[in-house]
């Protein structure tokens, strides 16, 4: 339905941020993620950051899944 | 390598496949049939085919593609109208790449471009606002397709055009909303599904809470699912697990991206410019309040109001895209599939959209 | 509606294939010769080969090269992968009125330098100027002549188990061009891989045996090139996705814009089908050359029956799916 890719925020300016996706970079809009900081990951769609990716949750859900697999 | 790469790890993916197979065998034993899940999102359809997960699970879980590809679900008359816009003199049509090859009743945008029409593919809708700013003597129309993930970005483009006081910028809105179509599908009873894999990125805007109706009114087990191999597999695993325990919950299996409330900033911006509208869906006729159009005070940005585009009723073809997007048939059941209809000579949009079900089957699952 | 040429006809995929088959091969009656990137001239004991290629690239200057360098390397590489040593080439220019002389000079200098590096002479040329709007800056055609190496390719000997080798990372040229186009807003440190491969090929052909067939995966990318090899030489093959070298930046750019690295253009890579008995020697020989140090075995020939001719990809989760030519063209997408 919608392409989205996690991008690391390198620099933040007023409504824009420079992000990095595995070495490819792009200036993207941050209107929908006003609280974004350098070092965050945002989910990128059509040139806009749509949400901040919570890496802690990512690790937790992966750990939880690892436990299921090891049962 | 960052923390998010863990979801594409190969070893984890292979072990996850085994786990899903083991669990679905339990279901098979209990019920004497395969569990049937609908992936509502077109990017899921594509990812299942491209990673080979769909093929690998074919004897264990039945995955049905749902109405989640924005160009596929757009009815033919709207598509014809959008293509016809290119015939208005001194007009630049801006579009996502997804629309270029979609067949109109007479021709596609790609074809219109070869005829010399000014059609530009943009990555971001905001780019089309810049094009309008740089071409004040031309009309610039953006073809506004998309679901809830994309609609806020369209709203942002309107905001920019408003701030720049542009009078030559409009959007042709043909957006679609997820909840009304899910309700319509479930109400119709045409499609038998045990559970739903919910679209991860639409949910970013909507939030988990917006799916409570599935649990409360329809009692359909549902899992909000991500797009990497492991995430696709855990989505299926958790759905089958809900089925085995006969629990009609909504699980957020993409919690690092999808929040409970969704993105309020995005939703507020969307609500500022747009209001609900009855939209025609391919193969499903009009669904009440299933799309968004401009509020009256922003009518100046509404391409439908600005340009008089009249299109005839499209003639009937043997294309069965309408049934395919509802999940009632497989592409291979359409007589045109890979015969009269291929990506280079498409009859219906499902064959050319990169996340169309027919395109997924043609590109990744075709054997001959 | 009248059938017309669309941009997709020039992308090297399914439509290009049909156009060549239905318009050119049918009229020029040269099906046999059209299987290779360069054609042998039967009048000279089949020693001399010839090829031609036209270059239209937007933008004309990109990280790692420009249209001039590309016009030399492209034709040199077509001769090289046919198993020939490039000797000389001609260059024809179609220039748009108003084009800056300084840019043309820079293009010519790049061509001269690349030709020197490759060891070919540019021996004849032609210049035409068209009215503004009738061309986009400059178009270049180069036609190259070469001589077969003593050792010949053994395309008739392709058999089950043969290894498929790619000489290095894929997708760099495609991404470099995209990031040079400002409208996409993509920024990468990637350079086009555009390079003359004749010395690499010569080195390898002179020292090892067992090369069945070679091609350079340009437009349409690695997948389209290999699908064509499979069809032209009637063998089926399976690639192992996890062994295909794709740089991180290429992955990143593809994730953002919705592209598949297997379909991105390369201008400095070769794919080879080689005898399994010699695969390690060949791989080592390629790796020794600076342009081949990222070489990898990426798959194998799986069957050679008359009905063969399909390309498959083994995915990281262990399933296999079919690969087809690039359908249509690469367009940035949101869904």
Image: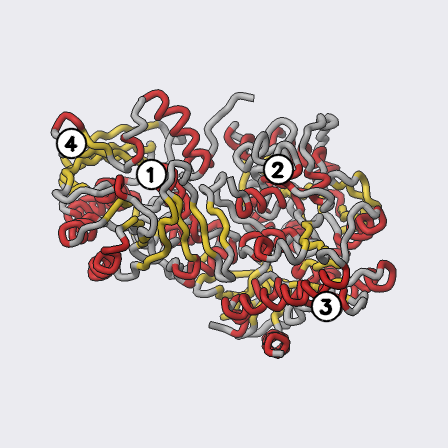
Instruction: Classify mark 3: helix, strand or loop.
Output: helix
Name the chain letter of the residue that bears numbered label 4: C
- Check residue B139 in the rendering and tell me which mark sits there, or answer none: 2
Residue wearing tag 4: C46
Instruction: Classify mark 2: helix, strand or loop.
Output: strand
Question: Real-space Cα distance between discs 4 and 1?
Answer: 20 Å
Residue wearing tag 3: B241
- Please state which of the two labelled residues, at mark 4 or mark 3, is closer to the viewer: 3
Instruction: Classify mark 4: helix, strand or loop.
Output: loop
Instruction: Classify mark 1: helix, strand or loop.
Output: loop
Q: Report the quarter where the N terminus of chain C lies.
A: top right
Q: Residues within 10 Å of mark 3 (few under 14, many from 20)?
A: some
Is any atom of residue C283 visible in this view? yes
Residue wearing tag 1: C233
Residue C142's image quarter?
A: top left
Q: Are marks 2 and 3 in contact (CB under 8 Å)?
A: no
Mark 2 / mark 3, whichever is N-terminal: 2
Residue drawn at x 38%, y 49% as measured from the top left: C302
Q: Are marks 4 and 3 in contact (CB under 8 Å)?
A: no
Name the chain letter of the residue that bears numbered label 1: C
Q: Is residue B103 left or right of residue C155?
A: right
Name the chain letter of the residue that bears numbered label 2: B
Question: Real-space Cα distance between discs 4 and 3?
Answer: 68 Å
Q: Residues within 10 Å of mark 1 (few under 14, many from 20)?
A: some
């Amino acid at each position: 339905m919608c392409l989205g890719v996690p991008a690391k925020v390198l620099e933040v300016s007023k409504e824009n941020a420079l992000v990095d996706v595995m070495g490819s970079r792009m200036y993207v809009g941050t209107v929908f993620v006003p609280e974004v900081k350098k070092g965050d990951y945002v989910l990128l769609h059509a040139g806009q950051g749509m949400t901040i990716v919570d890496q802690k949750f990512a690790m937790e859900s992966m750990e939880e899944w690892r436990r299921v697999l090891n049962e | 390598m960052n923390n998010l790469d863990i979801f594409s790890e190969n070893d984890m993916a292979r072990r996850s496949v085994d786990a899903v197979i083991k669990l679905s065998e339990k279901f098979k034993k209990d019920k004497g049939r395969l569990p049937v899940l609908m992936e509502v999102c077109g990017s899921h359809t594509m990812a299942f085919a491209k990673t080979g997960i769909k093929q690998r699970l074919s004897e264990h879980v039945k995955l049905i593609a749902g109405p989640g590809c924005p160009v596929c679900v757009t009815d033919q008359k709207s598509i014809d109208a959008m293509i016809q816009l290119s015939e208005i003199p001194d007009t630049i049509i801006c579009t996502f790449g997804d629309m270029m090859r979609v067949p109109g009743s007479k021709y596609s945008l790609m074809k219109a471009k070869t005829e010399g029409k000014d059609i530009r593919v943009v990555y971001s809708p905001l780019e089309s606002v810049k094009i309008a700013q740089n071409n004040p003597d031309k009309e610039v129309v953006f073809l506004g397709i998309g679901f809830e993930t994309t609609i806020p970005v369209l709203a942002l483009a309107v905001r920019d055009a408003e701030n720049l006081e542009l009078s030559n910028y409009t959007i042709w809105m043909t957006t679609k909303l997820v909840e009304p179509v899910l309700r319509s599908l479930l109400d119709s009873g045409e499609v038998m599904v045990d559970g739903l894999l919910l679209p991860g990125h639409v949910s970013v805007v909507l939030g988990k809470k917006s799916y409570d109706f599935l649990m409360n009114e329809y009692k359909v087990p549902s899992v909000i699912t991500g797009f990497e191999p492991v995430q696709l597999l855990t989505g299926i695993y958790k759905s089958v697990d809900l089925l085995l325990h006969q629990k009609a919950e909504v699980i957020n299996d993409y919690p690092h991206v999808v929040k409970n409330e969704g993105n309020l900033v995005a939703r507020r911006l969307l609500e500022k410019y747009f209001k609900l509208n009855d939209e025609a869906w391919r193969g499903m006729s009009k669904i009440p309040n299933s799309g968004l159009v401009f509020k009256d005070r922003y009518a100046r940005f509404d391409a439908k109001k600005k340009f008089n585009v009249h299109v005839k009723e499209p003639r009937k073809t043997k294309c069965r895209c309408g049934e395919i997007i509802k999940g009632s048939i497989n592409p291979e059941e359409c007589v045109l599939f890979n015969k009269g209809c291929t990506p280079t000579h498409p009859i219906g949009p499902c064959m050319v959209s990169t996340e169309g079900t027919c395109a997924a089957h043609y590109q990744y699952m075709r054997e001959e | 509606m009248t059938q017309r040429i669309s941009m997709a006809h020039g992308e090297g995929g399914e439509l290009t294939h049909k156009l060549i088959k239905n318009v050119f091969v049918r009229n020029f009656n040269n099906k046999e010769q059209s299987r290779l990137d360069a054609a042998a001239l039967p009048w000279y004991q089949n020693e001399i080969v010839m090829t031609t290629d036209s270059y239209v690239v937007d933008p004309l200057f990109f990280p790692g090269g420009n249209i001039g360098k590309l016009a030399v390397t492209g034709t040199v590489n077509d001769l090289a992968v046919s198993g020939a040593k490039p000797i000389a080439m001609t260059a024809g220019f179609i220039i748009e009125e108003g084009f800056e002389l300084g840019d043309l000079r820079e293009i010519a200098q790049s061509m001269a330098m690349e030709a020197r590096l490759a060891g070919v002479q540019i021996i004849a040329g032609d210049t035409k100027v068209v009215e503004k709007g009738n061309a986009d800056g400059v178009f270049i055609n180069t036609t190259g002549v070469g001589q077969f190496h003593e050792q010949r390719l053994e395309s008739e000997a392709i058999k089950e188990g043969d290894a498929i080798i790619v000489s290095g990372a894929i997708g760099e040229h495609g991404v470099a061009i995209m990031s040079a186009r400002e409208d996409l807003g993509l920024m990468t440190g990637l350079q086009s891989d555009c390079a003359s491969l004749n010395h690499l090929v010569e080195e390898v052909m002179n020292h090892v045996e067992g090369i069945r067939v070679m091609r350079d995966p340009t437009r349409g990318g690695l997948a389209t090139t290999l699908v064509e090899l499979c069809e032209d030489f009637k063998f089926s093959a399976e690639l192992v996705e996890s062994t295909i070298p794709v740089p991180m930046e290429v992955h990143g750019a593809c994730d953002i814009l919705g592209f598949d690295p297997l379909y991105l253009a390369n201008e400095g890579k070769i794919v080879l089908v080689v005898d399994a008995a010699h695969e390690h020697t060949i791989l080592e020989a390629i790796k020794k050359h600076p342009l081949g140090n990222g070489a990898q075995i990426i798959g194998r020939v799986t069957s050679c029956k008359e009905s063969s001719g399909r390309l498959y990809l083994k995915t990281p989760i262990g399933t296999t799916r079919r690969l087809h030519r690039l359908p249509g063209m690469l367009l940035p997408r949101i869904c």
